[in-house]
Each structure stands twice: as C-alpha cells, then as structure tokens.
DNA sequence: TCGATTGCTACGTTTTGAGTAGCACGGATT
DNA sequence: AATCCGTGCTACTCAAAACGTAGCAATCGA
C-alpha cells in the first residue's frame, strides 16, 4: 500500500498550502471520509460502513493522512474533526448547499449520468 | 481506461448531489484541473503543463467528466469554466484562503510532510 | 476466561493512472 | 498543392493504487 504521508504533494513540489490540500483531498475517499465525519465521533468500522464499505486498507491510510494534516483525531469515543478539520468541514457544507442548486439546474445532463 | 462519466457516484447510489460532487472531485487531478483553469482559456496542452505533465489519458477523461457535469466547456480559445464551474471555482478560492491560515498553524506537522 | 469490539494489517486480485508515441483535423505558409 | 504547425485526443504497455477478504493484537465487560 502507498504511504502518501511520506511523499506529499503529488507533482508540484512548490509546497503551496492549496497544493497540499488539493493533493490530499484529491485522493480517493478523502473527501467522503471528511464528509461522513460530521456524524460526530465515529468508530473505524462505522466510518467504513458510512463510506460504502471502503477497503480498510485505504480507510486507514486516509485517516493516517488526515491525522497527520491535523484535520482528524482519534478520541476514545472515535474519530472526530480537529478544530481545523471542523473549519474545513464547514466549507464542505457550503459545497453541499451549492451542489443542491447545481444539481437542479435546467438541462442538467442528468448530473453526468448517461 | 475508465469512463467515470458512465458509472457515476462510486458506491452510494443515492445520487445525492453532494455525493456526485464528492465523487467527481475525489478523482485524481480533478480538483487540480479545476484550480488551474482559473488562468483563463487554456489549451489542452497548456493545462497539461500546469498540472505537472499529467498523463493526457487522465486529463482527457477528467475534462470529459467535467464537461458532462457542466462545469467546464471547450471554446475555440481553449477550456474554460462554465457559469457553474466558475461558482465552484470560487469555493476553491475560499479553500485556498483557508489553507493559508491552516498551513501557518502552530506546530503544523510540516503540512503533513515527514 | 470468554466473547465481543476496538483499530489496524497482510496479501492476492482488479482497477486506475503514468508515460510515451502518435493519430486526425484544421488553419496558416510557402 | 504540399508542408508545417498546433489543436484535441487516443493506443499502447507498464507501474501504482485501491479492492476485498481474512485475520491479528489489544482492550474492555461479563
């Protein structure tokens, strides 16, 4: 399995924060995990279920990354946002609100479905 | 090569807009492409350069998806945001602004780098 | 001590992306 | 007309990432 925590920022080694972020969020399941964590403290297995039974290998890798990025932490009650993570999650809320408008646009190409 | 435009929304077939979006944005290079498009009309090759010489296979697949999602379109001058895409890109601007604060947090774990 | 649950790992298979070459088309030049 | 150039895009092989299942060590309660 890969270890993205080590070789950060795919390409673009400028190290600009947005690049670090886009790189992390662009990995499979990262956004989804971040999104599902809004349910409150969630155990590894519960989170896995929320994420359509994502492979534990990947889930663990992502959680490790998110923890390294100071966005998620593990408490006795389960995985939760850090303060930073909560701020990021709020942006996802905006994204969600926007996506509702976007999805109901006229002639929506069926949201990409064919 | 895959054709995400056909089998949308990895897992979670609820089809909720946010899921469609998280799924699309969670694919490799999608966020980055969306980000780099803020440079204005960009040709396929220029965009490829902006994205650290991403493989044309992937770039094309992503652009096809983004166009299907009504976020990007191809004009004679090059690839540009649609109206919807521009709105989404604005959210990325907020994300970028936030990431600057986030990156300069005290004891930042070096932004995830080890 | 036993069972149940926790986070997490090993490992073989499948899917996805990387990397390079090159195609078909269109417009300008010669 | 023939040539060159840049456009979006595709074919191909190979490497990397993710999947899917099984199962581990640790912990807690009964």
Image (tube, coloured by chain):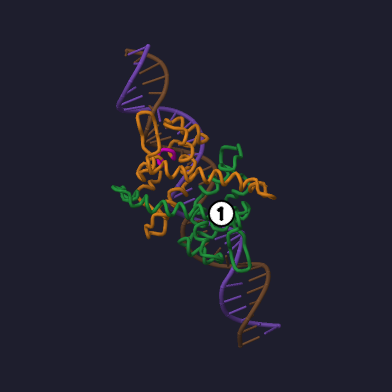
Chain colours: A orange, B green, C brown, D purple
- From the image, give the main secondary structure of the stretch colored magenta: helix
> Which secondary structure, mark 1?
helix
Is residue A64 rendered to the left or right of residue D7? left
What residue is rendered at 50% in x and 42% in y? A93
Compared with B101, B74 (above or below) is: below
Compared with B59, A68 (above or below) is: above
Residue A59: say if magenta: yes
Q: Provide residue B42's location: percent of width, then percent of height.
A: 55, 66
- Quarter of the image holding residue C10? top left
Residue B53: say if magenta: no
Within 10 angstroms of label 1, few (less than 14), some, or many (20 or more) residues?
some
Specify start and end residues of the magenta stretch as a single range.
Answer: A58-62
Q: Provide residue B91's location: percent of width, then percent of height.
A: 50, 52
- Quarter of the image holding residue A83? top left
Q: Provide residue B48's location: percent of width, then percent of height.
A: 51, 63
What residue is rendered at 60% in x and 69% in y? B77
Looking at this rendering, what residue extends furthest in the left direction?
Answer: B107
Indicate the chain on which mark 1 is placed. B
- Quarter of the image holding residue D2? bottom right
Choose between A35 and A93: the one closer to the eye: A93
Name the residue carrying label 1: B87
């Amino acid at each position: 399995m890969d270890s993205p925590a080590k070789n950060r920022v795919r390409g673009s080694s400028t190290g600009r924060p947005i690049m670090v972020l886009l790189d992390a969020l662009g990995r499979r399941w990262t956004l989804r995990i971040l999104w599902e964590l809004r349910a409150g403290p969630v155990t590894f297995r519960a989170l896995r279920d929320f994420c359509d039974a994502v492979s534990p290998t990947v889930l663990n890798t992502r959680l490790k990354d998110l923890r390294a990025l100071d966005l998620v932490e593990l408490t006795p009650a389960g995985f939760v946002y850090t303060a930073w993570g909560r701020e990021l999650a709020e942006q996802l809320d905006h994204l969600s609100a926007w996506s509702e408008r976007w999805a109901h646009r006229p002639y929506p190409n069926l949201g990409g479905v064919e």
